[in-house]
Structures are given as C-alpha cells and as structure tokens.
Image (cartoon, rainbow, N blue to C red):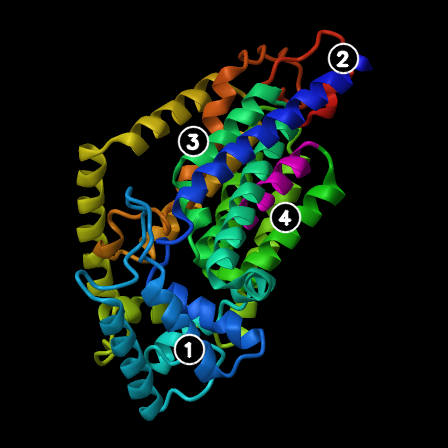
Amino acid sequence: MPNIRRTQRLGLIGMVLIAVAFAGLQLTAVTGRASPDTKNYLSYALSLSGDSREEAGRRAIAYSCASGQHASLSPVPWTNRKTVGESEESCLRRLNDSVAYWTRHGNTEGMTAPFANQRFMAIFEARPGYPLFLVPFVAVFGMTWGLWLAGLVVALAGSVCVLLTLRAAGASRRAGLAGQALFLALPTGTVAMNPLSDGLSLALGTAVVLGCVLLLRDRPRTGAAFVAGGLVLMFLVRYSQALLLAAALAGVLVLRSGWLRLKQRQFTPVLRAAGLCAGLTVGIYAGAHLLGWPMGEDSAQDLLTHHYQRPDLPNPWPEFFVQEGVFWSAWLRRQAASPVLPVLLALSAWALLRRRSVVLPIALAAGAAGLLNQAGHPNLGQLYGFRLIVFLWLLPALAIPLLLDRPAREPSPVPAQPEEVGSGQRDGRVGVAQQSREGT
C-alpha cells in the first residue's frame, strides 16, 4: 500500500510539473494568437454576457486590432488578426466600416456582430458552446487574459485526458506522462491554446476517446457517460467535428469487433461501443438538420464562393473534388518538405505493429476524423496550419508513448478469450484473472 501511494504521488507530481512548465511557456505569448474568426466568437460571448450586439462588435474589433501589438518575438501560429502592414487605426476603420456595410445590407439578427453576410455568420451562430465557455473567463479576467486562461484550461484538460486514456488502457505511468507532454508539445497544444472553437472541440474529443477506452475495459457506465457527454458538448461547440469523430469511431470499432470475432476473442464490449457511437452519429446529424444549421453542401458553397460573396454553384461537387485533388497534392508536398508529421505517423505505425492496446484502434479513429475534417475544407489557405486536421495529431500523442513500455506477451491460443490489451509493465501478481478483466 505505501508503494502504491508513493507511485500515485509521483504520477500526480509529474502531471503537475508538466502542466506548470507548459503554462510558464505560454506566458511568453499572452497575445498574438487571435485569428480573423476570433472576433466572431468573442462578440458572441460578449453578447451572452449582456452587451448589445453593437457594443459586443465594437469591443471584439478593438481586441482583434490590438491583440498583436505586444506579441512575442517568436511568431505564434494563427496570428493573422490584421492584414500585413496594416496599422491598428486602419484595422479599426476597416472592420467598423464592414460592420456598418453588412448591417445596412440585412445582417441585423443573431448573437455575433455583423462582420460579414448573414449566411456566413450563421456558421458561428451554430457554435454556441465555445462562446458560452468563454463567458466566465472574459467576465472575470477581461478579454486578453480571459481568452488566454480559457485556452490554457482547454489545453491542460485535453492533456490530462490523454494521460488518463493511456493509464486506463494499461500503459505505465511514464507512458501516460509522455502522452500528456506530447499532447502539449505537438500542434494539439498550440491549437488548444488558440482562441477558436477547435481547441475546445479537441479537448472534448479526448474525453470521448477516454470514454471509449473505458467502455472497452469493461467500465460501461463511466465510459458511456464520457462518450455521450463529450459528443453532446462537442455538438454545441463544433457539430461537424463531433459528427466525424462519432462516425469514425463507429466505423473503426465495427471493423475491430469483426476482426476479434474471426479470431474467436471477446468482441461484445467493442460492438457495444460501436453501437453507441453509431447511435450518437445519427443523433448529431439529425439534431443539426432539425436546427437548420449549415450542412455539407453549405460548406462546399462557402469554399467555392469565397464565403458566399459570389453566386452559388448549381452543382458544387465537381469543382469541390477538383479542389480536393489540388489541396492534397500540395499537402503531400508540404509534408515531404517538412516531414515532422510523417515521422511521427511512422512511429505510430510501429507502435500499432509492436503493441497490443485498446487505445490504438481508437487513436486510429481519431486520426481518421482529423483527415475527414480537413477533407471537408480543402482550402489552400490552411496548408500551413494544423487546426482543421488537428485530430490526426492525436494519433502520435496516444500511440508513441506505448513504445516506452515492454511489448505485451502473446496470448495463449484459447478460443473466445479476451485479448491482452495493456501495453504497460504489469506486476507479476496481477495474474490471469486480472488479464481477463482487461477485455479487448
């Protein structure tokens, strides 16, 4: 018992030290993270806080135009809050003139200020979860520190979920801490800190991943609560990403259950998790449709008409798929020139081949959700960014730490037995009964 308590204390100390180190590094760039979309979410949050739509827009514009004035010397990704060479006064004038223009042209309703036409702003109206999350931070700490603290909470929450996911899958303490550190060091940490809905969606996605691992480790109530709760909250934050994550998890888990059945291993928990994710996929799609939120064709028209500033295409899909080809060929060239992600994916593939863990198929599903999300937005402007494809970076954050543990022993060829899943170092006293409880 004293050894167990000592191990728990060491794990907690390690987790806190990683979090404190990350927070300290983020203090070097409290501002300079805003993107053009930040003002949309901020104005929505200010409206929820009680400001009029006009006042919320004015304050969001002031933040957007001033937020980069004291940025760190090292550039932070996604800091294009102003056009190149534009002064703060010119930025204020341009955005205020734009608000006045779109107000005159019919954008007079909604929680977000009229920074663009009403059809484009409807995209942000359909993401109330992130502005609602920002309200207490902005109300208590103001816009600058409130947005920074909200990002820090999101990033640390996502990293802790990664740590808990690995530990729940049977990985060692050091593997769990490595996963936490990787999440914060990779673009997942950068995206989580940015004042956009992508970070909160990512953090909730890690909670869903944790829930799936718990489901497969025969903890159905807790696991189902994490999966359902995480996807419901993701629906309010960024429903398209929630839909893709739920669908990817359902598809991968169905394939996994089929493979386990062929191998005469226990597949019921996997199939149960697949059914839950499939049901939530249908619910998310139906909910977005019933609420009249923008769907797939709206996204294609948004891309091809430059945010609905040109007439809609009668059939956008042929040109959309042309854009897909252009984007992915450019993306592959980019990866070849800067092969950080390919190297990490190669290490992840090595972990897939050398380790047996419930977390690996779930990590694959998360990565697939990231690829699908990027495929839905083949915009060359996103070529150097990470936010749309960020779920793909969860794969190395969850898979590579497993390489720190010894490979699991090959299971004995006994039919219909749960396969060994924990890739962590196990105490010899665990025994056969404990391995049975570990499920698929």
Give the Cα separation between the discs numbered 4 and 2: 33 Å
Residue shown at 18%/45% (left/top)? 329
**Mark 1 lies on residue:** 57
Of callouts 4 and 2, the N-terminal one: 2
* Front of the two marks 2 and 3: 2
CA gap, disc 4 and disc 3: 21 Å
The residue positioned farthest toward the top in the image shown: 428
Q: Position of residue 146 (x, y in %)?
A: 52, 58
Residue occupying the point 35% across, 71% down: 298
> To which residue does mark 4 refer?
227
* Quarter placement of the C terminus: top right
Q: Is 216 part of what is drawn in magenta?
A: yes
Q: Amino acid at mark 1?
A: Gly
Residue shown at the point (59%, 37%) measured from the top left: 160
Distance of mark 4 from mark 1, alpha carbons? 36 Å
The amino acid beneath tag 2 is Asn
**Amino acid under disc 4:** Val
Q: Which element is circle 1 on?
A: helix
Q: Disc 2 designates what residue?
A: 3
Can you tell which of label 4 and label 1 is closer to the viewer? 1
**Label 2 secondary element:** helix
Question: In 3D space, how far apart are the residues under numbered discs 1 and 3 (Cα atoms)?
Answer: 39 Å
Distance (Cα) linking label 2 and label 1: 57 Å
What segment carries the magenta color? 203-217
Which of the two discs, 1 and 3, labels the residue nearer the N terminus? 1
